[in-house]
Image: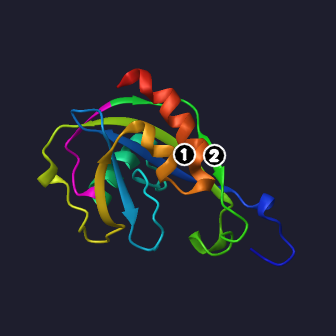
Amino acid sequence: MTASSSPDDLPYRACAGMMVLNNQNKVFVARRIDTVSEHWQMPQGGIDKGETPLDAAFRELEEEIGTRNVSHIHGLDEWLNYDLPKDLIGKIWKGKYRGQKQKWFLFRFLGEDHEINIETDHPEFSEWRWAGVDELPGLIVPFKRDIYETIIRKLRPYF
């Protein structure tokens, strides 16, 4: 971002988000490796050029948690946006984006916990666990809380 530009002039980064449920309807959450924050998040990642959001979701699951052993249950039709806090604009994603526009998908994990491996080629998470869906808004960084509440409301009927 240049000194003369505004965060409002920046685009949103296209991203796929994944809510992964186990057989007790607990949600996969993890702590980012690049932060000392106490916050947890669901997996998410950028959509590559020429890639569909669903293809990106499957790829990101393998890259972030080491498995594609899931079944796709549902995807939201709409994009959900969030803005970065002003103090993070210019520091994240090389300053190219004001936040993210996300396509969210609901998956059922079909495997056993030992199949999940966050020690991937390019690890993003330091630890993971299964959390109750109603815990999610309190686990995420505050600037993503509204989007998590929307995701829960829209995906809960498909659990």
Residue carrying label 2 = 81
Secondary structure under tag 2 reads: strand
Amino acid at dot 2: Asn
Residue depicted at 83% across the width and 70% down the height: 5
Please give the name of the residue rendered at 69% of the width and 57% of the height, measured from the top-left corner: 11
Q: Amino acid at mark 1?
A: Gln
Few, some or many residues within 10 Å of mark 2 (<14, 14–19, 20+): some
Residue 26, percent from left and from top: 30, 38
Give the label on residue 102, or none: 1
Q: Position of residue 50 (x, y in %)?
A: 46, 50
Q: Earlier in the sequence, mark 2 or mark 1?
A: 2
User: In the figure, 136 relative to 91: above or below?
Assistant: above
> Range of the magenta residues?
65-72
Kindly identify the residue that appears in the image at 52 percent across and 29 percent down. 153
**Viewer-proximal residue, 153 or 8?**
153
Q: Which mark is residue 13?
A: none
- Image location of residue 59, percent across then percent down: 32, 52
Q: Quadrant of the C terminus?
A: top left
